[in-house]
Image: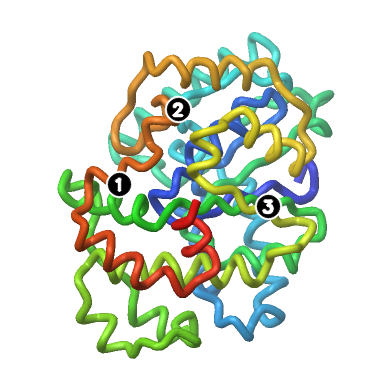
């Protein structure tokens, strides 16, 4: 890699607010952001749910894969909005970059180059050593321990959202026709992520969908948390804290990954506070505090109780519920 050897990695379950956190990092002038590159470049030989006892077996492969993901330049991976000015691009380079992104996105919409590396980073030669590559992934959250084992210089940020908030957001996506209802219960049992919990496979598969979603969230995130808690490379951030105290939590994340504070980040956070710009289901430009406890109005008391019944047995679930 031309940039720093080991990237920063943001992971979390889908609908946890990982894009919001990623864009806070992307607002820093030194950051080169890759949005879900494992969507464009898939390694089917690296399990999405690595068996807990197989970290050593897959560690080297995982490290090579993550470094490869840092080089992905597909339109969706490089063009996620909002976009920010960068210290490693001069004015003319910035103009050329944005024109390149616009052309690549148009080409992708026409059915060509959706997953091809057709966007150039336009990094000035003198700035290459100052670039910090940030990768965001929801598909690879369970692989996080492998990446930490493989890359000694990595900095990993694990975002966890209140499980009822995750479930409510997923169900809202289903209602809008933007998400499916598939839950990977069999995969969790087959790979060992359901070990240690009292429930049997067929019992879980017979549960209401919100309870299955809560189990999936708990099994994966609890495994990652227990594996990495206390590791120097690992930082766990909660969505509620990030939404309630955005600047304070972002400063903690910046310190963890080795970034100083950025005036551009200050301006971005202030623009979010005003709530003047609202975005859709997959967007990030909304007032953060409006997301706190939103699930209480979207789920029934019965649904909330069923979710709590599952996650109260986990370290992260009970921690978030009490908070």
Is 11 on the left or on the right of 317, as rendered? right
Q: Residue at the spot x=66%, y=71% of the render?
A: 227
Dot 3 surroundings within 10 Å: few (below 14), some, or many (20 or more)?
A: many
* Residue 270 versus residue 107 in the image, above or below: above
Residue that label 3 marks: 235
Q: Residue at the spot x=54%, y=50% of the render?
A: 159
The residue lying furthest to the front in this view is: 322
Tell me, for residue 212, which label it has, or none: none
Q: Position of residue 180 (x, y in %)?
A: 23, 58
Q: Secondary structure at mark 3?
A: strand
Nearer-N-terminus badge (2/3): 2
The residue lying furthest to the top in this view is: 91
Residue 262: quarter of image: top right
Picture colour scheme: rainbow
Foreground: disc 2 or disc 3 = 3
Q: Position of residue 31 (x, y in %)?
A: 67, 32
Q: Secondary structure at mark 2?
A: loop
**In this view of the protein, can residue 271 be seen by the observer?**
yes
Residue that label 2 marks: 81
Q: Secondary structure at mark 1?
A: helix
* Residue 183 versus residue 138 in the image, above or below: below
Q: Residue at the spot x=69%, y=47% of the render?
A: 8
Tell me, for residue 295, which label it has, or none: 1
**In this view of the protein, can residue 3 be seen by the observer?**
no
């Amino acid at each position: 890699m031309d940039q720093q050897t080991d990237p920063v990695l943001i992971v979390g379950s889908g609908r946890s607010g990982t894009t919001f956190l990623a864009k806070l990092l992307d607002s820093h002038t030194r950051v080169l952001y890759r949005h879900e590159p494992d969507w464009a470049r898939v390694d089917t030989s690296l399990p999405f749910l690595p068996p807990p006892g197989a970290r050593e077996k897959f560690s080297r492969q995982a490290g090579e894969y993550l470094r490869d993901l840092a080089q992905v330049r597909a339109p969706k991976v490089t063009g996620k909005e909002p976009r920010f000015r960068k210290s490693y691009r001069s004015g003319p380079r910035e103009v050329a970059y944005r024109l390149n992104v616009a052309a690549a996105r148009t080409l992708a919409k026409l059915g060509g180059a959706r997953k091809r590396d057709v966007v150039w980073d336009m990094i000035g030669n003198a700035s290459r050593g100052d670039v910090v590559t940030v990768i965001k992934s929801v598909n690879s959250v369970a692989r996080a321990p492998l990446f930490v084992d493989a890359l000694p210089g990595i900095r990993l940020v694990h975002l966890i959202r209140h499980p009822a908030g995750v479930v409510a957001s997923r169900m809202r996506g289903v209602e809008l026709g933007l998400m499916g209802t598939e839950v990977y219960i069999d995969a969790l049992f087959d790979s060992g992520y359901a070990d240690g919990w009292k429930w049997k496979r067929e019992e879980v598969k017979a549960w209401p969908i919100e309870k299955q979603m809560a189990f999936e969230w708990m099994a994966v995130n609890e495994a990652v948390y227990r594996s990495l808690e206390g590791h120097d490379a690992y930082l766990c951030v909660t969505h509620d804290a990030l939404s309630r105290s955005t600047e304070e939590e972002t400063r903690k994340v910046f310190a963890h990954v080795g970034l100083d504070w950025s005036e551009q980040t200050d301006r971005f956070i202030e623009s979010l506070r005003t709530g003047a710009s609202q975005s859709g289901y997959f967007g990030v430009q909304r007032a953060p505090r409006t997301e706190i406890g939103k699930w209480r109005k979207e789920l029934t008391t019965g649904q909330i109780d069923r979710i709590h019944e599952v996650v109260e047995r986990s370290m992260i679930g009970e921690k978030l519920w009490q908070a």
